[in-house]
């Protein structure tokens, strides 16, 4: 694990790196998490003896991500899973058929590059299974010795080198680069992307250098060029950037630029190439910025700009795959069209030309020679991709679509070729009644149609991730950077690339412009359109101090902002990551399709063989008349065409694509409407929710409670002193009721005309309590220093009635807390509390040194849409319940207002879990919706947890659904979208099954005896190719989803500042 010394003084970059390596990140999944693991994170395990002492383990667990190409159906994904499961050390495998992504968790020994060796074995297993590994990422845990051990000491700099690698052509090349880099001493992590020709190396800066990285790659037989170098040191993060410099004409210019850069504050090294017109600069991020370097060069009379890195996205990969199939289709079409015309059209439409083509060449008719010449390239050049896939699948004991394609096309080609050779040897072509019995066009047409189908399929699959692509395009290219003087006034403005923004930068946002990054408004105000992030169509007013989200649009006024998060830390980047992980997950219903697909191909092959022998034996026995055999065919060829049609018409791809494509579109639609779905399993469970449990405060209510009435009881303390004491206690809590009491104290002091001390942020300051004991579901008990309280009272021009020499014991909470403290509430006070509670208000009792000093009546207004949402859910057949820590009278009053009858009041966070479990015994699926820390256990215990985006980090992390708006109408949409997505999945399965159930009998000739209509193999192949396309198109129809209307206008609600913390 990460040593404490590093956590205490390391920068955020190094701390985050080590938290990921040690599993100590707060966001990292634990063993109790319902999600199995997070991709590309590393979890280091340890062994524990019976005494509780944790001893270092000799093994570690790593997570790796692969981008695998060539998977076309569930049988392919099953082959990959099976191949990886046989690799030593692999614990779990997750395969996404649509995205081609594979996540692998594996155990390995510490040190000795065992993680790299295991990854190489994983890559080799995938390639041996017949698939291409386009990119792979290795995350290696630290070991107990060698260079990696030094990384644990916390004193070593962390080096990150990004290198461009030339010469990689396949996954074997990328594997060789990975192995070479992973073998370097001190290397902790290696990532090689074949698609971008890049490698990223992370390791101990004292053992690894950029030059050693380049040397290792060159020793492996490839060319390498450094793109960037980042070094985490004790004096800051050292970053290396490449700057293009124009205007240098001689060595003097080169020296001038070099001297300027080397003399710049924070620059550690600089080198300038006159021929390349580029400068490489290594500098400390905490002392200077890349744009300062550019400005320094420009002030010297040269033009400069930072070289931008280009990264290929998943959409680019899908586009590349679609282009690949398009190329194969065009090549195949160029051979197939003349072949089809020669075989089917010329003999009928142009007898004269056909007579010419009957001339003999090499002992064969010219048209036969031309057919062979046209069909052979299609079969073995364009079709080699199918042969490779079939060979590798069969070699590993599985079968996929490639096997069916190869069987069908090879049978037709082989029979045609053997038939031609047989007739040539027997000199049949010299007879007047000779009729050709070849059908070379069948295999070529099959491959052409399949290539067309795969092109349409990959193009359609690329559209399933349109939501992510649109989100990624929201960030603008440039931003206006402003520099402020000491008085906070704008001194200078300049337009910079968004990638050059740093945390703490002050930016100006013009009307109509996109907000460049996450931040806080520092001046001005405007309405911001956040519909592309939250789905809220009404612009939200943003004033000074309000948070803004990168990618949203400033509609009206001009304002200034301060950047708080950049790059991958922004809300937009985190949303994209969450959606991508959701699209990687499998819904439970997909397991049945995978099981069916595993038996599908063998069954189809058996049916094909049975079909062939059934027709052949029946014809040989005279069961059907010989006139059924078409002219130019014999019994064998006639039977073979039925068998081939059965093979090629069957489509396992449609079954494999039915679920993942729908999940991709559904999660994307949800993201664009402000509903984040974390996985396919949650999506499927949400469809079966029969009971939904609501939290009260902040969920059914607005979450902005206010003190509306007070009952003062203390015989000697003034109401002002009671207010100050209560605010002192509650200032240590983030609970909405606590904030209401603090606000009430400020109002009491203000109404009395008393001065209020303020903290640096301009907020009213109260003393800090001691020995704070927060009891969830009950209240707070603490101790207030008598001298501090007296000082606070004097600051407010008040005289304290309490002795300053003694500490004050203060309790504030509900009746249960008072009973626990042995305090009783007078009958008159109890009557007053009941009266307030029956109005839906919460009564909070306040006691000082064992005496009840007063009661606060706090009201939290209901959300306007709450009752309509509950009514709509009940109309959907979903029972609604409420679990609240508030008392029975208040909770039941709120329940009556919204129409909830099943009330569970006065429950602690742990008791909310018991409520969920009790309801689960009577219901198929129970959902929980909440927003606070106290709701997190119940969110985890529920079958489906739904968190409001305005809630706490823990609640959002624990939930399966995240509603980005503080609006209950999105609960209805979340459930309705889940049902629509699962309904679409069912439609896809029905279509895939019905297609096969209808087309396979048709291809087998079930209607031939009555209609004499045969499904030719090339038509069957076209139908097979289009069947998978139809499933993808069916999933794309989810893009037309419309959120349900509750009969009330959507409410514009500002996103709370804590929202940004959740991402």
Image: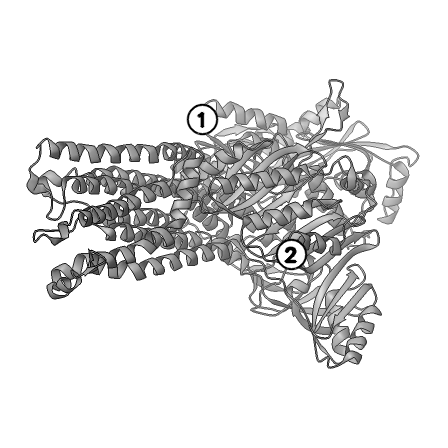
Q: Which is more toward the observer, 93 or 715?
A: 93
Looking at the image, is mark 2 or mark 1 earlier in the sequence?
2
Q: Residue at x 61, y 27 (%)?
A: 907
- In whole angstroms, how far apart are the C-alphas of marks 2 and 1? 44 Å
Residue furthest to the right in view is 805
Left or right of 749? Residue 538 is left
Q: Position of residue 197 (x, y in %)?
A: 59, 57
**Contact (Cβ within 8 Å) of mark 2 with mark 1:** no
Residue 719's spot in the image, x, y percent?
A: 77, 40
Q: Helix, strand, or loop for circle 1?
A: loop
Q: Nearer the viewer, residue 753 or 196?
A: 196
Left-right relation of 378 to 682: left
- Quarter holding residue 636: top left
In the image, is 514 to the left or to the right of 274?
left
| Quarter of the view holding residue 105 | top right
**Crowd tier of the residue under label 2, counting other residues whose Cα lies within 10 Å: few below 14, some 14–19, many 20 or above:** some
Residue 255 falls in which quadrant of the image? Answer: bottom right
Say if residue 965 shows up in the picture.
no
| Element under disc 2 | helix
Residue position marked by numbered label 2 in the rendering: 567
**Left or right placement of residue 938 versus residue 285 in this view:** left
Residue occupying the point 82% across, 40% down: 153
Residue 13 x, y percent position in the rendering: 73, 50
The residue singled out by tag 1 in the image is: 923
Q: Is residue 23 visible?
A: yes
Camera-side residue of 1061 and 990:
990
């Amino acid at each position: 694990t990460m040593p404490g010394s590093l956590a205490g003084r390391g920068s955020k970059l190094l701390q985050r790196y080590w938290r990921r390596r040690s599993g100590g990140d707060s966001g990292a999944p634990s063993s109790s998490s319902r999600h199995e693991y997070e991709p590309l994170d590393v979890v280091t395990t340890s062994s524990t003896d019976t005494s509780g002492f944790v001893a270092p383990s000799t093994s570690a667990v790593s997570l790796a991500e692969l981008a695998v190409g060539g998977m076309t159906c569930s049988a392919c994904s099953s082959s990959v899973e099976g191949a990886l499961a046989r690799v030593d050390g692999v614990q779990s495998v997750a395969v996404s058929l649509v995205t081609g992504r594979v996540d692998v968790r594996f155990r390995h020994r510490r040190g000795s590059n065992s993680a790299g060796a295991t990854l190489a074995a994983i890559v080799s297993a995938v390639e041996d299974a017949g698939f291409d590994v386009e990119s792979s990422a290795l995350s290696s845990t630290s070991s107990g010795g060698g260079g990696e051990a030094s990384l644990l000491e916390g004193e070593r700099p962390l080096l990150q080198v990004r290198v461009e690698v030339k010469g990689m052509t396949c996954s074997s090349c990328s594997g060789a680069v990975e192995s070479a880099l992973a073998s370097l001493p001190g290397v902790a992590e290696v990532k090689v992307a074949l698609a971008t020709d890049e490698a990223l190396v992370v390791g101990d800066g004292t053992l690894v250098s950029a030059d050693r990285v380049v040397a290792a790659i060159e020793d492996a037989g490839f060319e390498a060029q450094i793109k960037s170098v980042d070094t985490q040191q004790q004096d800051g993060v050292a970053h290396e950037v490449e700057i293009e410099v124009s205007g240098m004409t001689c060595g003097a210019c080169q020296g001038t630029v070099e001297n300027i850069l080397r003399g710049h504050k924070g620059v550690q090294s600089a080198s300038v190439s006159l021929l390349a017109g580029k400068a490489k600069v290594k500098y400390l991020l905490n002392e200077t910025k890349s744009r300062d370097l550019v400005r320094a060069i420009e002030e010297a009379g040269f033009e400069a700009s930072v070289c931008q890195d280009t990264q290929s996205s998943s959409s680019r990969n899908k586009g590349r795959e679609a282009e690949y199939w398009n190329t194969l289709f065009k090549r195949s079409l160029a051979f197939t069209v003349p072949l089809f015309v020669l075989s089917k059209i010329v003999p009928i439409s142009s007898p004269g030309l056909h007579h010419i083509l009957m001339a003999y060449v090499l002992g064969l008719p010219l048209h036969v020679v031309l057919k062979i010449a046209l069909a052979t390239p299609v079969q073995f050049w364009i079709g080699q991709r199918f042969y490779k896939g079939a060979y590798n699948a069969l070699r590993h004991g599985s079968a996929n679509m490639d096997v069916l394609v190869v069987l069908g096309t090879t049978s037709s080609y082989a029979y045609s070729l053997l038939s031609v050779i047989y007739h040539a040897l027997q000199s049949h072509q010299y007879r007047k009644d000779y009729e050709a019995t070849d059908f070379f066009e069948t295999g070529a047409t099959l491959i052409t149609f399949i290539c067309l189908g795969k092109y349409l399929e990959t193009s359609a699959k690329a559209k399933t991730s349109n939501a992510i692509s649109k989100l990624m395009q929201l960030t603008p290219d440039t931003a206006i950077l402003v520099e402020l003087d000491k008085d906070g006034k704008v001194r200078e403005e300049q337009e910079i690339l968004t990638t050059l923004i740093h945390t703490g930068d002050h930016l100006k946002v013009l009307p109509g412009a996109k907000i460049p990054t996450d931040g806080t408004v520092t001046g001005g105000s405007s309405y911001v359109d956040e519909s592309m992030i939250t789905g809220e169509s009404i612009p939200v007013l943003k004033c000074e101090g309000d948070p803004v989200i990168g990618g949203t649009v400033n509609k009206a006024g001009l304002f200034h902002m301060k950047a708080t998060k950049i790059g991958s830390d922004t809300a937009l980047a985190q949303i994209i990551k969450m959606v991508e992980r959701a699209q990687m997950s499998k819904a439970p219903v997909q397991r049945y399709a995978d099981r069916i697909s595993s038996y599908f191909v063998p069954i189809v092959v058996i049916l094909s063989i049975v079909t062939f022998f059934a027709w052949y034996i029946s014809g040989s026995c005279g069961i059907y008349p010989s006139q059924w055999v078409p002219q130019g065919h014999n019994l064998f060829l006639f039977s073979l065409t039925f068998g081939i049609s059965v093979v090629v018409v069957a489509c396992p791809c449609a079954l494999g694509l039915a679920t993942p494509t729908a999940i991709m579109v559904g999660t994307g639609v949800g993201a664009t409407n402000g509903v984040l779905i974390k996985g396919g399993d949650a999506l499927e469970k949400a469809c079966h929710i029969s009971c939904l449990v609501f939290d009260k405060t902040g969920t059914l209510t607005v979450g902005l409670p206010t003190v509306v009435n007070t009952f003062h009881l203390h015989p000697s303390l003034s109401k002002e002193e009671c207010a100050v004491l209560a605010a002192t206690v509650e200032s240590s809590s983030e609970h909405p009721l606590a904030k209401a009491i603090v606000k009430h104290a400020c109002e009491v002091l203000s109404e009395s005309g008393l001065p209020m001390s303020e903290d640096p942020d301009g907020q009213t300051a109260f003393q800090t309590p001691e020995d704070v004991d927060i009891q969830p579901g009950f209240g707070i008990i603490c101790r207030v220093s008598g001298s501090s309280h007296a000082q606070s009272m004097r600051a407010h021009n008040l005289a304290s009635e309490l002795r300053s020499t003694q500490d004050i014991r203060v309790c504030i909470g509900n009746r249960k807390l008072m009973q626990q403290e042995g305090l009783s509430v007078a009958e008159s006070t109890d009557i007053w509390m009941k009266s307030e509670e029956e109005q839906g208000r919460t009564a909070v009792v306040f006691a000082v040194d064992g005496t009840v000093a007063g009661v606060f009546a706090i009201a939290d207004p209901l959300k306007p849409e709450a009752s309509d949402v509950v009514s709509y859910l009940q109309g959907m057949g979903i029972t609604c319940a409420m679990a609240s820590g508030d008392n029975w009278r208040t909770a039941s009053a709120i329940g009556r207002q919204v129409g909830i009858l099943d009330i569970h009041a006065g429950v602690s966070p742990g008791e909310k879990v018991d409520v969920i479990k009790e309801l689960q015994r009577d219901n198929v699926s129970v959902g929980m919706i909440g927003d606070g820390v106290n709701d997190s256990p119940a969110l985890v215990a529920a079958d489906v947890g739904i968190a409001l985006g305005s809630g706490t980090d823990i609640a959002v992390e624990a939930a399966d659904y995240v509603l980005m708006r503080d609006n209950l109408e999105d609960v209805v949409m979340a459930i309705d979208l889940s049902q629509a997505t699962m309904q679409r999945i069912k439609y896809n399965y029905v279509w895939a099954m019905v297609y096969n159930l209808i087309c396979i009998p048709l291809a087998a000739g079930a209607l031939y005896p009555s209609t004499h209509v045969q499904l030719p193999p090339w038509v069957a192949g076209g139908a097979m190719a289009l069947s998978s396309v139809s499933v993808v198109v069916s999933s794309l129809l989810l893009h037309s989803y419309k959120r349900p209307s509750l009969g009330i206008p959507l409410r514009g609600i500002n996103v709370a500042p804590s929202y940004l913390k959740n991402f």
